[in-house]
Image (cartoon, rainbow, N blue to C red):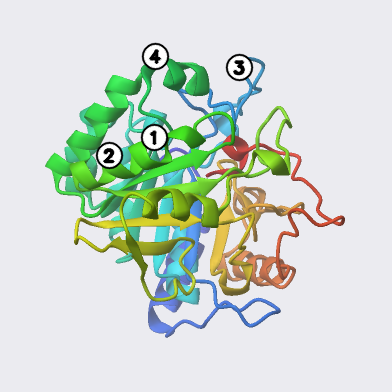
């Protein structure tokens, strides 16, 4: 174990686990009637890229490793969400989750919970891990790819690694992940001229491109609304070359989706800024150091890791979770005068 806890605490946890298994579980409902079904867990704040919309080139203050949740702690919190509150999906994020040593060990632990287990990654080291993660029980991957231009890729990520990401995509497909989804953050004046080229990449390679509107979570604070390329503009650019038909409403899923009329796959857009999906949001988040957040743009956090390390029972931690979800707001208010930007960047929160 990463953290010793003593026989008394272990006995308490075993008792809690038994009570959770016996209980049917209940829905975790926020003040607006939204049922929480999806948990995003950041396993590290560290990353091997320095993407301009996420991190500064230098100067990031990394968490001390002792401050980061152990695998046992992650598993314990995940079990509370799954067994008590019927959470159905868990997504591992970072930072870059694949830089966390022995990640397959954690995947194997979480896969036993029987949830839809997914991961978001930059793909740069996926060739080394894809098969192992798949065998451990990881079901789906989303891989970030914002440009197909090697020069632009190095400018955006501050790393000369496009070839490694493309190889990681192939490795994910070879390992049997299905679907493989590719995330592209579109920023005006940076890569908006590649929307169609990226769509063509998805069509050619049998993966689903998911275009993401540029959000105010960059570390340097250079986000401005005029840098956002909205969903309507993205879809129009693709449809002008490859006619599209919109698929049924997304529900709680973050992406609106379209199918190509010629039958060659699908494409999605996550319109966080221009068409927020807050009204259907079913997601909550844990940062790498165990801070519970009810929204990506939340300004308040709730320290579950300290509660665990202070010896609180699962019942006590569950009460903390319920109180926190009781503060979940209606929406993030981007582009509204009352919007308050989070004081942490995407890499520190968990993408």
> In the shown orientation, is residue 189 left or right of residue 164?
right
Q: For mark 2, does the 10 Å Cα neighbourhood hold few (<14), some (14 to 19), or many (20 or more) residues?
A: some
Residue 229 x/y as whole percent: 58, 45
In the figure, residue 55 lies in which quadrant? top right
Q: Residue at x 33, y 49 (%)?
A: 241
Looking at the rendered image, the disc whose residue lies closer to the viewer, 3 or 4, is 4
Q: Is residue 207 visible?
A: yes
Q: Is residue 125 visible?
A: no
Q: Nearer the viewer, residue 232 or 306?
A: 232
Q: CA distance from mark 2 to mark 3?
A: 28 Å
Earlier sequence position, callout 1 versus callout 2: 1
Q: CA distance from mark 1 to mark 2?
A: 10 Å
Residue 135 x/y as whole percent: 17, 47
Q: Residue at x 55, y 41 (%)?
A: 288
Residue identified by numbered label 3:
57
Residue identified by numbered label 4:
160
Q: Which mark is residue 201?
A: 2
Disc 2 on helix, strand or loop?
A: helix
Q: CA distance from mark 3 to mark 1?
A: 19 Å
Q: Residue at x 86, y 57 (%)?
A: 338
Residue identified by numbered label 1:
145
Earlier sequence position, callout 3 versus callout 1: 3
Disc 4 on helix, strand or loop?
A: loop
Q: For mark 4, does the 10 Å Cα neighbourhood hold few (<14), some (14 to 19), or many (20 or more) residues?
A: some
> In the shown orientation, is residue 215 left or right of residue 138?
right
Disc 3 on helix, strand or loop?
A: loop
Residue at the right extreme? 337
Q: For mark 1, does the 10 Å Cα neighbourhood hold few (<14), some (14 to 19), or many (20 or more) residues?
A: many
Asked whether the residues under the numbered discs 1 and 2 touch, taking CB atoms below 8 Å apart as contact, a structural biologist would say yes
Q: CA distance from mark 2 to mark 4?
A: 20 Å
293 is higher (above) or lower (below) than 146? below
Residue 66 x/y as whole percent: 57, 31
């Amino acid at each position: 174990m990463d953290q010793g806890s003593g026989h008394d605490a272990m006995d308490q946890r075993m008792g809690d686990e038994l009570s959770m298994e016996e209980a049917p579980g209940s829905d975790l409902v926020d003040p607006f009637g939204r049922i929480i079904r999806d948990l995003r867990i950041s396993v590290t704040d560290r990353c091997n890229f320095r993407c301009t919309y996420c991190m500064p080139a230098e100067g990031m203050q990394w968490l001390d490793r002792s401050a980061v949740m152990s695998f046992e702690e992650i598993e314990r919190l995940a079990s509370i969400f799954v067994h008590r509150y019927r959470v159905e999906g868990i997504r591992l994020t970072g930072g870059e989750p694949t830089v966390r040593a022995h990640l397959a060990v954690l995947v194997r632990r979480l896969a036993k919970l029987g949830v839809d287990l997914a991961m978001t990654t930059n793909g740069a080291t996926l060739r080394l891990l894809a098969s192992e993660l798949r065998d451990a029980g990881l079901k789906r991957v989303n891989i970030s790819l914002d440009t197909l231009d090697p020069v632009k890729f190095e400018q955006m990520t501050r790393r000369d690694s496009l070839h490694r990401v493309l190889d990681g995509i192939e490795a994910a497909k070879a390992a049997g992940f299905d679907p493989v989804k590719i995330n592209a953050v579109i920023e005006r004046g940076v890569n908006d001229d590649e929307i169609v080229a990226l769509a063509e990449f998805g069509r050619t390679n049998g993966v689903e491109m998911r275009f993401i509107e540029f959000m105010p979570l960059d570390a340097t604070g250079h986000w401005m609304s005029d840098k956002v390329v909205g969903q309507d503009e993205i879809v129009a650019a693709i449809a002008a070359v490859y006619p599209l038909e919109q698929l049924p409403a997304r529900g709680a899923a973050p992406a609106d989706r379209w199918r190509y009329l010629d039958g060659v796959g699908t494409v999605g857009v996550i319109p966080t800024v221009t068409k927020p999906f807050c009204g259907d949001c079913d997601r909550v988040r844990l940062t790498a150091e165990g801070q519970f957040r009810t929204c990506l743009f939340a300004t308040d956090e709730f320290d579950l890791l300290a509660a665990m390390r202070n010896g609180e029972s699962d019942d006590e931690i569950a009460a903390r979770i319920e109180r926190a979800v009781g503060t979940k707001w209606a929406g993030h208010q981007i582009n509204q005068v009352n919007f308050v930007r989070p004081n942490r960047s995407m890499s520190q929160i968990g993408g």
